[in-house]
Amino acid sequence: MRKFLVVLDESRECLNAMRFAAMRAAHTNGGVEVLAVIPPEEFNHWIGVGDIMREEARERIQVHYEVFAKWMRDKQGVEPELVIREGVPVIEIMAQVQDDPEIGVLVLGAGTDKKGPGPLVTQLSKNSGSLPIPITIVPGDLSKERLEAIT
C-alpha cells in the first residue's frame, strides 16, 4: 500500500497537510504515516532530566497525534500510523523515507507568513532532486472546501 508521509509539528500549516494526506489516502486506498521529530536540543541536560523531557515530548506528540488520528478515522476512514524519531528534522524525514519503502509521497504544509514557506519546505525543496519520492506542498491558507475539491 502506498503511504502519504506527513510531518506532525506545532505549525498552523500542519493542519492542511494532515487533511490533504488523509483525503488523498482515502480516495486512493492508501495509508497515512504521521512523523513527529523531537529535535536533539530539547535534551541537552543531565541524563535524568533529559529522559524526563524526552518522555514528556513523546506524551505531547501522542496527544497532538490523537486529535488528527480521530479525525482521519472518523471522517476519512483512514487509520494513520505514528512514527516518532529523534534528531534533526530534515535528516529524520529523509531517513524515514529511506526506511519505509511504502512511502510514496511526502506531504508538507507551507507557511503563509512573510518569512517564507517554513524551514522544512525550504530545506526539503532544495533536496527534492535527490529524493526517491515526490513532495506535495499544501498551502497553509487553503480552505477546507478547496482541499476537498482538489483531493
Image: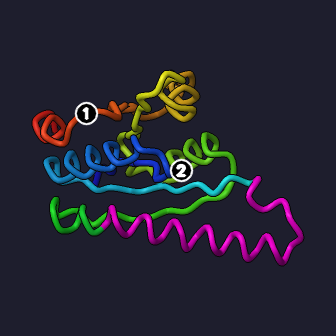
Of badges 2 and 1, the one in the foreground is 1
Seen at 51% across and 65% down, the residue is: 61
Q: Which mark is residue 96?
A: 2
Examine the image and state in which quarter residue 109 appears.
top left
Give the vertical position of 13 relative to 73 (above or below): above
Location of residue 45 in the rendering, given as x and y in whole percent from the top left corner: 86, 65
Question: Is residue 143 one of those drawn in magenta?
Answer: no
Quarter of the picture containing the N terminus is: bottom left
Residue at the extreme front of the image, as rendered: 114
Q: Secondary structure at mark 1?
A: loop
Q: In the image, what residue type sits under mark 1?
A: Leu
Q: Main secondary structure of the magenta part?
A: helix
Q: Is residue 87 left or right of residue 139?
A: right
Question: Is residue 57 one of those drawn in magenta?
Answer: yes
Examine the image and state in which quarter residue 16 appears.
top left
Examine the image and state in which quarter residue 66 appears.
bottom left
Give the vertical position of 125 relative to 76 (above or below): above
| Separation of residues labelled 2 and 1 (CA atoms) | 27 Å
Residue identified by numbered label 1? 142
Q: In the image, what residue type sits under mark 2?
A: Gln
Quarter of the picture containing the C terminus is: top left
Seen at 38% across and 51% down, the residue is: 102
